[in-house]
Image: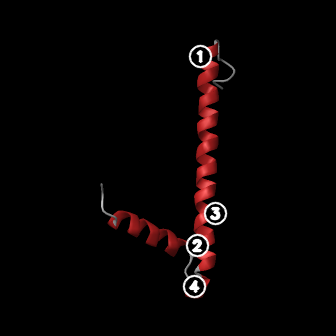
Amino acid sequence: MRTVTARNMDELLQIGMIIVIKAAMTWLIHWELKGIEHEQSAMSANKKTLGEVIHSKMKEHDEAPKQ
């Protein structure tokens, strides 16, 4: 609805930036999930599910030393 009421160039720029940010977030999420799926296929001998892979990655991230 906001695109219909954009009255000047600043408002159009804001809308454009929101679209760019949303597209970037979508692409990053897609890229990350593809990486996880690739890791899962590489670990197929261990028979881990995608949820288990995500859980183990989150656990590794939480346990990593903070800088």
Q: Earlier in the sequence, mark 2 or mark 3?
A: 3
The answer to whether the residues at label 1 and label 3 have Cβ atoms under 8 Å apart is no
Q: Earlier in the sequence, mark 4 or mark 3?
A: 3
Kind of residue indicated by mark 4 = Lys
Q: CA distance from mark 2 to mark 1?
A: 43 Å
Q: Looking at the image, is mark 2 or mark 4 nearer the viewer?
A: 2
**What is the quadrant of residue 61 in the picture?**
bottom left
Q: CA distance from mark 2 to mark 4?
A: 12 Å
Q: Position of residue 36 (x, y in %)?
A: 58, 67
Residue at position x 56%, y 77% in the image: 49
Kind of residue indicated by mark 1 = Asp
Residue at position x 55%, y 81% in the image: 48
The residue where tag 3 is placed is 34
Few, some or many residues within 10 Å of mark 3 (<14, 14–19, 20+) = few
The residue where tag 2 is placed is 39
Residue at position x 62%, y 57% in the image: 31
Label for residue 10? 1
Q: Position of residue 41 (x, y in %)?
A: 63, 77
Few, some or many residues within 10 Å of mark 2 (<14, 14–19, 20+) = few
The residue where tag 4 is placed is 47
Q: Earlier in the sequence, mark 1 or mark 4?
A: 1
Kind of residue indicated by mark 2 = Glu
Looking at the image, is 60 positioned above or below residue 30? below
Kind of residue indicated by mark 3 = Lys
Find numbered disc 2 in the image and state the secondary structure of the residue it sits on.
helix
**What is the quadrant of residue 22 in the picture?**
top right
